[in-house]
Image (spheres, rainbow, N blue to C red):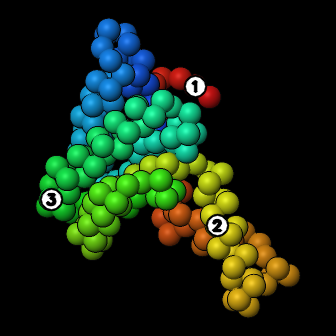
């Protein structure tokens, strides 16, 4: 791979509801169709030898603001996707990592995420990061809390706090920063 080829591509999976509405379909059909796009994105990432593919699947804001029925459908769809695809991802050498606030997930989804991460943890062809119930603000907040705990425990010092000391507490600190962000809805922000 030459230096101009991205090593880490991040995709904000947005627009499934609009896609469904344009076709006079229920919103959940847009979300279901989005799972096919995920499969294509993973195949593309493997073909192009990317190191990391991050998919922003459900933001904290959407988890809190969308109708409960839609959020429950999305979480059930995620569970189904993990159940149906973990073995395939493992066979292709894909390592799966889930980032985000897991505190609102039911036990079935939590167990499946743990199982998928464990099964794929030693794979090296591609790291697939799934951001579920994630936001940058959430990540900074959880990192700050953990950093503060280490300050109290004497493992860190306020006097030496800088980016190099704080960054390891962020979810993706061990991965390269994204070279390319794509928003699937076509919206520019």
Q: Mark 1 and mark 2: span between their CA atoms? A: 29 Å
Q: Quadrant of the C terminus?
A: top right
Q: Quadrant of the N terminus?
A: bottom left
Residue 150, located in which quarter of the rendered image? bottom right
Q: Secondary structure at mark 3?
A: helix
Residue at 48% over, 23% down = 186
Q: Please state the horizontal and vertical placement of residue 29, each as a whole percent of the image.
A: 28, 24
Q: Secondary structure at mark 2?
A: helix
Q: Which residue is mark 3?
A: 87
Q: Which residue is mark 2?
A: 143
Question: Can residue 6 be seen?
Answer: no
Q: Mark 3 and mark 1: span between their CA atoms? A: 36 Å
Q: Which residue is mark 1?
A: 188
Residue at 55% over, 45% down = 60
Contact between marks 1 and 2 (CB within 8 A): the answer is no
Q: Mark 3 and mark 2: span between their CA atoms? A: 32 Å
């Amino acid at each position: 791979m030459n230096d101009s080829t991205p090593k880490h591509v991040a995709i904000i999976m947005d627009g499934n509801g609009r896609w469904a509405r344009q076709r006079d379909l229920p919103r959940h059909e847009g979300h279901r169709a989005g799972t096919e796009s995920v499969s294509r994105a993973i195949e593309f990432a493997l073909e192009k030898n990317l190191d990391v593919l991050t998919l922003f699947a459900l933001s904290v804001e959407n988890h809190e603001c969308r109708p409960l029925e839609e959020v429950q459908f999305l979480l059930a769809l995620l569970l189904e996707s993990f159940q149906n695809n973990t073995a395939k991802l493992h066979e292709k050498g894909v390592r799966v990592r889930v980032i985000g606030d897991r505190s609102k997930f039911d036990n079935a989804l939590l167990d499946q995420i743990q199982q998928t991460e464990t099964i794929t943890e030693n794979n090296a062809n591609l790291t697939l990061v799934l951001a579920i119930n994630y936001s940058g603000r959430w990540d900074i907040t959880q990192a700050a809390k953990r950093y503060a705990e280490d300050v109290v425990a004497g493992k860190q010092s306020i006097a030496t706090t800088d980016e190099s000391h704080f960054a390891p507490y962020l979810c993706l600190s061990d991965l390269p920063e994204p070279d390319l962000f794509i928003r699937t809805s076509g919206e520019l922000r």
